[in-house]
Image (cartoon, rainbow, N blue to C red):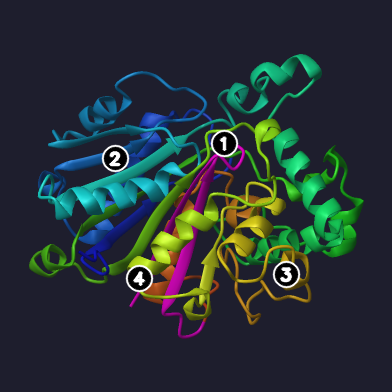
Amino acid sequence: MSLRGTAVIAGIGQTEYGKLPGRNPLSLNVEACRKALADAGIEKDVVDGLFVKYPTSTFHSMYGQTVAEALGIQPAIGGVWDQGGAANASMIGFAVMAIEAGQCDVALVTFADNPRTGTRQAYQRGWGDDAVYGWFGTPAGYAMIAQRHMQQFGTTSEQLGAIAVACRKHGAANPGAQLRNPITIADHQASRWIVEPLRRDDCCLVSDGGAAAVVMSAERAEELGVADPVPILGFGQGQTSWEVAQRPDLTSTAAAVSASKAFAMAGLGPKDIDIAEIYDCFTITVLLTLEDYGFCAKGEGGKFVEDGALELGGALPLNTAGGLLSETGMPGMQLVLEAVRQIRGTAVTQVPKARTAIVSNQGGIMHTHSTLILGR
């Protein structure tokens, strides 16, 4: 059974992004969900599925029920998912499967957090047993992976910089982006080290904010008169259970497994994709994902991203609203929302005649991966 096009994203909604003092994750979730329902043109009483990514900085038990109560709904199915930054795209896939199985009819998928004005402890903590050797914070693991890619394939810091330049350029054109300062390769090279070889401009933002999407069957969207539903063509997941130091290969990731499933469901390949909304918690994440998705061969990502290839008008426009490096550091849902806008033709930095978009979400230190393909 193929699920290609059986379900749609009927509505999207978001809060402001950045520094939002006085807001908590619950209020941000509610705002994003209300806006997503309004965008779909439906009332909350038709929602019977609620899929929530827990707030990274302040996790607590039964959070899905807390969000449901705040929304004033009693869903038949739902809960909280923990795949780190991969969870948002994965939850959309779970919602599609639940709808297909008759377990729910209309689902809300939502995430919100406030690490910018709340606590950043989740990002700063020691990482497993290796903390005794000084491994603190998330950047260290990605730096190790980046170092290996450079040693193995000759990838350069300037090539990573090309990814940052593209995302920051697109974010600068987005009035809703948290960081609206474009940079050059020279600026990237002048930015300070965080964990070598990753510089400050290789690392994503820390942001408050919330975002949500409404998922339903294509048939239901027609019945409810949804104005501009965007079909879900394919989705897939891939995971590794091994910590970075235990992996036999640091430059191949579960993104390849995830993408192969999504492409197979969609009946498409890399050459058919118009826009890529790729999880850019760090620039090396983008490089590995592009390789593992098949946009270029393994080890050739550095050359692939050079010379404006990822900018508007380039071979593969990337993170057209700015991504995690510029729009908001929120983990993943904003990429889904931008893909929907691109397919609708309503994006601020619109790619002409965009028909297909691929979205990647990734969690941990390349532990979990989820892929979503949208299009007409």
Q: Real-space Cα distance between discs 2 and 3? A: 35 Å
Identify the magenta region. Answer: 352-376
- Mark 2 vs 3, N-terminal side: 2
Residue 30 coordinates in the image, percent (x, y): 31, 38
The amino acid marked with disc number 2 is: Phe
- The numbered mark at residue 51 is 2
Binning the other alpha carbons within 10 Å of mark 2 as few (below 14), some (14 to 19) or many (20 upward) gives many
Q: Real-space Cα distance between discs 3 and 1? A: 24 Å
The amino acid marked with disc number 3 is: Val
Above or below, 253 against 172 in this view is above
Binning the other alpha carbons within 10 Å of mark 3 as few (below 14), some (14 to 19) or many (20 upward) gives many
Disc 4: which residue:
266
- The numbered mark at residue 155 is none
Q: What residue is rendered at 26% in x and 53% in y?
A: 214
Local SS, label 1 = loop
Q: Which marked residue is nearer to the observer: mark 2 or mark 3? A: 3
The amino acid marked with disc number 1 is: Gly
Marks 4 and 3 close (CB-CB < 8 Å):
no
